[in-house]
Amino acid sequence: MRKRRGQLTLRAAWVIPLLALLTLGLGTWGWIDRGQSFADALYRSAAMFSYNDVYGGGAGIADWRFQVGRWIGLVVVFSAALVALAALLQTQLAVAVARGLRQEVVVIGADRSAAVAFEAARASERSVLWLGAPALSVSTVRCIALPWPPGEPATTVLEHATDASHVVICEPHDAQSLVRLGWFVSPLGLVLGILGLLAALREWRPRYLFPVLLGLTVSVFYLYKLRVWNDYPFALRRFVPVTLPLLVGLAAFLLARLAGRGGLRRAAAAGLALALAAIYAKDTARIARYVDWRGAVRFVADVARRFGPEDVVVFEQPKSVHLLSLPLWAAHGVNVLELARFNPDPDRLRPEFDSGDHLHLNAAGYAAMAEAIDLSLLPDPPCR
């Protein structure tokens, strides 16, 4: 039943064009009966969408087709205006409805689990609000998905989740920092390292103080906040100097202590060590086969062949990144000129060089900029 009401809400806008066609049909029918051609009758029928009487100087007003069509046309005009206004203000309206109505379930987060929780709450016929959705979606007033509104996320959560019966948080938590460290030492290595720390604390020696204290201080400083993401592993560089060596060393400490016990514990230690070595060998082989910037050489060569010896390629370098300009010049002999970031002042841009938006140059402006470059100042490329 909930699904059917949602479908009716989404399809309600289609009533407007159907009513518009009905208005045109009634008007065309009436005017054809009065001797007008089809084209003229259709043209006169379009006038019935006007508020005043402009479709024939009052002729045929008594005809029921004109009477009905006139009022339907008026409804179409106002309905279309309201739908257009709602489309322009849909986000504001959805936020206002979400604030005004108490939602039983509030889902917070942009993770895939948030989408699953939202669908589960909707299937259970509870009123649900999703904060952090990838796009705005309003099937009914009891089922709203909102992207993060501008402003502080904490304020938004308090505004919507205070009166909710259930709040489902699907945002990545800072506690996942330790789990994501296991991406690089393997889950087995992470567990062995933590157990090794516990074993070192149990068998404490004064000589353990410096490495353990240094490692824990650095690790806690970086682990308290979630920094490593699947699309940004570069943040792990902070763990490389101290945390990773300490973790591997603690894992080795644990395995050495197990092996020293003899018997089955020695066999277990050997098995764990072999398993850890196999995991590291597999991951290392995958990294060794990886080619950074694969295809970049062919791409630069394809770009370079499009320029001749008289051409100059101008680069805007906001952060001095030479990933394309340097190989074009050094490896392919293309004339390259790097400029600072172009940030024109509209008040100082000469009108004859303005493309019309008071920001970008027109063809004459770029030609003037090219003529202002002294080509003799360009160094000769190393090869042609």
Image (cartoon, rainbow, N blue to C red):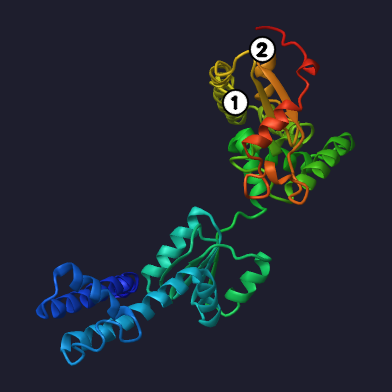
In the image, 23: left or right of 33? right
Q: Locate residue 136, reporting x and y percent.
A: 48, 64
Q: How many numbered tags mark residues here?
A: 2
In depth, the one of 223 and 245 nearer the eye is 223
In this view, the residue farthest toward the bottom is: 62
Which type of secondary structure does the marked residue at label 2 adopt? loop
Mark 1 / mark 2, whichever is N-terminal: 1
In depth, the one of 66 and 269 nearer the eye is 66
Which of the 4 quarters of the picture holds residue 2? bottom left
Residue in view at x 72 percent, y 51 percent: 225
In the image, 262: left or right of 201? left
Residue type, mark 1 in image: Tyr
Which type of secondary structure does the marked residue at label 1 adopt? helix
Residue linked to disc 1: 280
Residue linked to disc 2: 333
Q: 42 above or below 364?
A: below
Tell me the quadrant of the picture where the N terminus can be found.
Answer: bottom left
Which of the 4 quarters of the picture holds residue 44? bottom left
In the image, 122: left or right of 377? left
Residue in view at x 51 percent, y 71 percent: 89
Residue in view at x 64 percent, y 33 percent: 185
